[in-house]
Image (cartoon, helix red, strand yellow):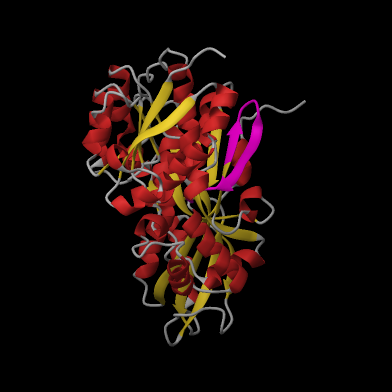
Amino acid sequence: MDETRTVNVGLIGLGTVGGGVAKLIARHHDEYLRAYGIDLRVRRACALEEERAAELGFTGDAFTRDWRDIVEDPSIDIVVELIGGEHPATEIFEAALGQGKHMVSANKALLGRHVERLAALAAENGVQLKCEAAAAGGIPIVNALEHALVGNDILCIAGILNGTTNYMLSRMDAEGLDYDEVLADAQRLGYAEADPSADVDGFDAASKVAILSSIAFHTRVTTDDVYMQGIRKVSAADIEQARDMGYRIKLLGIARWTAAGIDARVHPTMIPEDHMLANVSGAMNAVFVVGDAVGETMFYGAGAGSFPTASAVVGDILELARPIAEGSAPAAESEPYESRVPVRSIADLETRYYIRLSIADQVGALAPVVAAFAHAGVSISAINQLHDGETTGVADGACSVVFLTHTAAERDVEELCRALEALDEVASVASVIRIEDVEAWSAGAEKND
């Protein structure tokens, strides 16, 4: 074999994922050298805790508490940022790219909002920015969109992109538990953070939708463009009603190409119980992708965790390392996508809705409610009053009534909910959940003759 030069990695962050990356590279060093001709080494690591670094074998000059020592080290070829958040991650990206270092990151929060500027900086300095682990942990969805599926026009991406919320909804479905009870248990078991907002309010999934939409549709989509609604209002009663109707409730990230622009949203969604995504349980993730040529595909795996996420990070490192080891340079980052396709407002969405109301339990209370539906132009397809014991938190003297609609515009449903809340007969609009038309995801795909 021809002599190859060592490819040096600078690792910033030795937490759950960073530790996994360090262990994988050390464990598989000889295999990478034998199979790919890549002598890959973590030259230096940055962390706050020296003891943690020492556990992973980084002592002496190989350890630093200052990330600048990593990005300014001329021997380091690839900088890996695994601390998350916007600061000092933004400064790390800017400094490393400015020094001509290739970057690998799992930082979905930063890239979901600022990838355009950072990719432009990478292109300007002739280096690459890679982010497989930022989109769905260990699932190789970015690589699939950029390489294996590049011959397609992507029509739709729909995914379970957050393991915490999928774990919680799965527990609620299997055990009939309510949100607060499952959240407390998820926090105790380490599935949810002490402050679970990023997960349960949809921000984590929205960042991933932004990244995947930009790649799939070749246009700039940021996290702020993605409509997001979390799972805080989903109750055991809603999940039971969904099951009785043949649906399951999942927090989905959905990105669709439409003639009017990109439809990008994250929210609790009812999908048919026989759909592949409906049967993804626990903390697992899955991404359903429809291409015009390939049709329906699904990618399934762990969306978080030390080694699954580290697997994606190391895959990016190796892709950059191969040409470096051979004495050449990876191609520079392509110019970032411009905002050439508009992102649709959620108000333009048209779908069916599940609406659960707490209504005064008295004769004639339904009449003004039904009239409000008619006035808003929202057609009712079914009404179901829940029996005692099927709901919790219902006010005294009230009962829960579920309304299913025919296809309606989101803006009309928003107007309807405002009107309902103003009625004396309505104690609360307890839950509004969209019922997804999953058949529409494949509209435009070629028939497989």
Q: Does residue 153 show up magenta in the picture?
A: no
Query: Horizontally, is 305 left or right of 334 in the view?
Result: right
Which residue appears at 33% of the width and 63% of the height? 195
Residue 289 percent location from the top left of the image: 58, 37
In percent of width and height, residue 424 lies at 36, 77
State which region is magenta.
288-305
State the residue in front, 83 or 394: 83
Q: Does residue 69 appear to the left or right of 52 in the view shown?
A: left
Tell me the quarter of the image containing the N terminus.
Answer: top right
Residue toward you, 95 or 378: 95
Asked if residue 168 lies left or right of residue 414, the reply is right
Q: In the image, residue 266 lies at what x, y percent?
A: 44, 49
Which x, y percent locates residue 187?
Answer: 43, 67
Question: In this orientation, does residue 231 appear?
Answer: yes
Q: Residue lying farthest right?
A: 449
From where the camera sits, is residue 144 visible?
no
Q: Residue furthest front?
A: 60
- Which quarter of the figure has residue 58? top left
> Residue, x 41% and y 47% (percent of image)?
56
Image-quadrant location for residue 327: top left
Q: Residue 33, relative to residue 380: is it above or below?
A: above
Q: Is residue 6 above or below residue 180?
A: above
List the single residue furthest toward the bottom.
Answer: 396
Q: Tag count in the figure?
A: 0
